[in-house]
Amino acid sequence: MNLRDEGRRKVIVFRDRATRRADVMAFYGDATSVRPLAFAATIKDMKGLLHNG
């Protein structure tokens, strides 16, 4: 994951993965689950990157 400047804003850029299409389809097809604590920690980390980047 990287941050890219776009004017006054930052854009989060994720590395592509071979499983991206299947992951997206599982998400929209309600066929996957998310570990809530890991999800919350990841969002917190991303906010930290944005504010400190």
Image (cartoon, grey):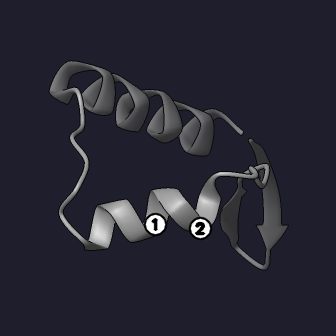
The answer to whether residue 3 is left or right of residue 49 is right
Residue at (70% x, 73% y) in the render: 8
Tell me the number on the disc at residue 21: 2
The residue at the far bottom in this view is 7
Residue at (34% x, 23% y) in the render: 41
Foreground pick, 27 / 45: 27
The answer to whether residue 30 is left or right of residue 42 is left
Residue 24, given in percent of the width and then of the height, sits at 46, 66
Residue flagged by tag 1: what amino acid is it? Val
Residue 52, given in percent of the width and then of the height, sits at 63, 33
Say what secondary structure mark 1 lies in: helix
Q: Quadrant of the C terminus?
A: top right
Residue at (77% x, 55% y) in the render: 16
Q: Are marks 2 and 1 in contact (CB under 8 Å)?
A: yes
The answer to whether residue 15 is left or right of residue 40 is right
Residue 5, given in percent of the width and then of the height, sits at 82, 65
User: Image quarter for residue 9?
Assistant: bottom right
Foreground pick, 16 / 40: 16
Foreground pick, 38 / 4: 38
* Distance (Cα) linking label 2 and label 1: 5 Å
In the displayed structure, 3 sits above or below 37; it is below
Q: Which residue is mark 1?
A: 24
Residue flagged by tag 2: what amino acid is it? Arg
| Crowd tier of the residue under label 1, counting other residues whose Cα lies within 10 Å: few below 14, some 14–19, many 20 or above | few
| Crowd tier of the residue under label 2, counting other residues whose Cα lies within 10 Å: few below 14, some 14–19, many 20 or above | few
In the displayed structure, 32 sits above or below 35; it is below
Q: Quadrant of the N terminus?
A: top right
Residue 48, given in percent of the width and then of the height, sits at 51, 31
